[in-house]
Image: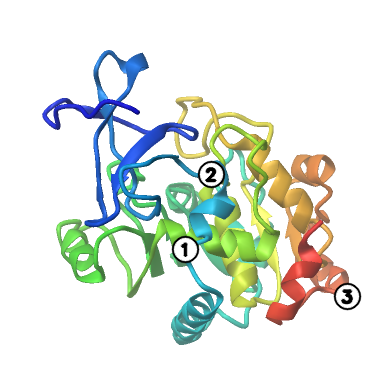
Amino acid sequence: MAKLCDSRVFPRFLKRGDRVLRNCSTGSPLLVEDPAANGHVAWLVRDINVSPLSESRLPTSSMEFAMTIEPEALEKLREKHRRWLSRLGIVDKPWLILGSAPSPTIPPDLIGHCARVDVNNAGKTANALGLPPADLTFRKRKKSWEEHPYVRTRGLLWLHTKSIWVMYLKLLAMPHVRYKSLMRATKAEREAIVNAVSGGLPSDIGEVGKVTNGVAALCYALFMGVPSVTLAGFSVTKMGHSYDDKGRIRRQIAEDTFVLRRLSDRGNVFTTELELSEHIGLPFIRDREDIIRNMGGAIGANPAQWKSAQI
């Protein structure tokens, strides 16, 4: 049995496979000694159920994170978000999702034809290119606002742990952020949507065990039943980001590759990036006419068809 530690010791981040303790009678996480961290301790995330005072491990795949969301709750989530997207006027439009890979390819005639969805801080690149405000921004909680303080978007879908009222208060302190409508989602909801659309990640794929926010945005679009999704600024080979020159290593490449390949034959997922098309097998498109030509036989929004995207 692991030894409980003094809570005053600064905790480290957990990684997959760590063994932890939890008091299930209160739902509170317990602190457990990490022998490899010189006495530092680890917190257990709150949404894992284990026996009282027994050892357990963190989830080893995105499927395990999503198991706490029942199908009925997931369908209610879908209906709620579809109503919100309908008010934004984008649920029935094709989507162009802009990721942050270097040198994105954005055909001019897709602007206006598609609803543009910026992932995390990709809107900084869109601003630099002189593009109009995004129709939707799909944003992680921990993504730096200092990195891109001038967010311009109609809809803001912010993955967050706090209530939406706390999120509103946080946004009030960001005078340069321009948005019209805010929606909240949780990490567990994100993973449940990815699993519903893709079938989930096996535990032996990648080191993180979940896809990037860009691929999660793709799964979100398909889950909401938009007609088609075109990916721009996506890569599983290029390092760095389009909005800075730091050349940071891009993570979760194996996870993204696995899910993108699963979704490549749906008939309604495309890319403007030739390299991604060649590497993954997604149909390559140059303009809106290519989207229309490729839409024959696409998998629709019917939840009964989600399994057809699985391998």
Going 43% across and 31% down the picture, which residue do you hit?
18
Going 82% across and 56% down the picture, which residue do you hit?
311
Query: Going from the N terminus, do you reach mark 1 or mark 3 first?
Result: 1
For label 2, count other residues whose C-alpha is less than 10 Å away and answer few (under 14), some (14-19) or many (20+): many
Q: Is residue 305 above or below residue 262?
A: below
Eye-nearest disc, 3 or 2: 3
For label 1, count other residues whose C-alpha is less than 10 Å away and answer few (under 14), some (14-19) or many (20+): some
* Residue that label 2 marks: 100
Query: Going from the N terminus, do you reach mark 3 or mark 2 first?
Result: 2
How is colour applied across the structure in the image?
rainbow
Q: Which mark is residue 68?
A: 1
Describe the element under mark 3 as helix, strand or loop.
loop
Q: Amino acid at mark 2?
A: Ser
Q: CA distance from mark 3 to mark 2?
A: 30 Å
Q: Quadrant of residue 32?
A: top left
Describe the element under mark 2 as helix, strand or loop.
loop
Q: Quadrant of residue 107?
A: bottom right
Instruction: Give 286 or 49, whichever is nearer the viewer.
Output: 49
Q: Which mark is residue 104?
A: none
Q: CA distance from mark 2 to mark 1?
A: 31 Å
Q: State the image coordinates of residue 146 (x, y, percent, origin top left).
A: 27, 42
Q: State the image coordinates of residue 72 (x, y, percent, origin top left).
A: 52, 80
Going 56% across and 41% down the picture, which residue do you hit?
209
Q: CA distance from mark 1 to mark 3?
A: 34 Å
Query: Going from the N terminus, do you reach mark 2 or mark 1 first?
Result: 1
For label 3, count other residues whose C-alpha is less than 10 Å away and answer few (under 14), some (14-19) or many (20+): few
Q: Which mark is residue 297?
A: 3
Q: State the image coordinates of residue 22 (x, y, percent, origin top left).
A: 30, 45
Q: Quadrant of residue 299?
A: bottom right
Q: Amino acid at mark 3?
A: Gly
Q: Is residue 38 above or below residue 221?
A: above
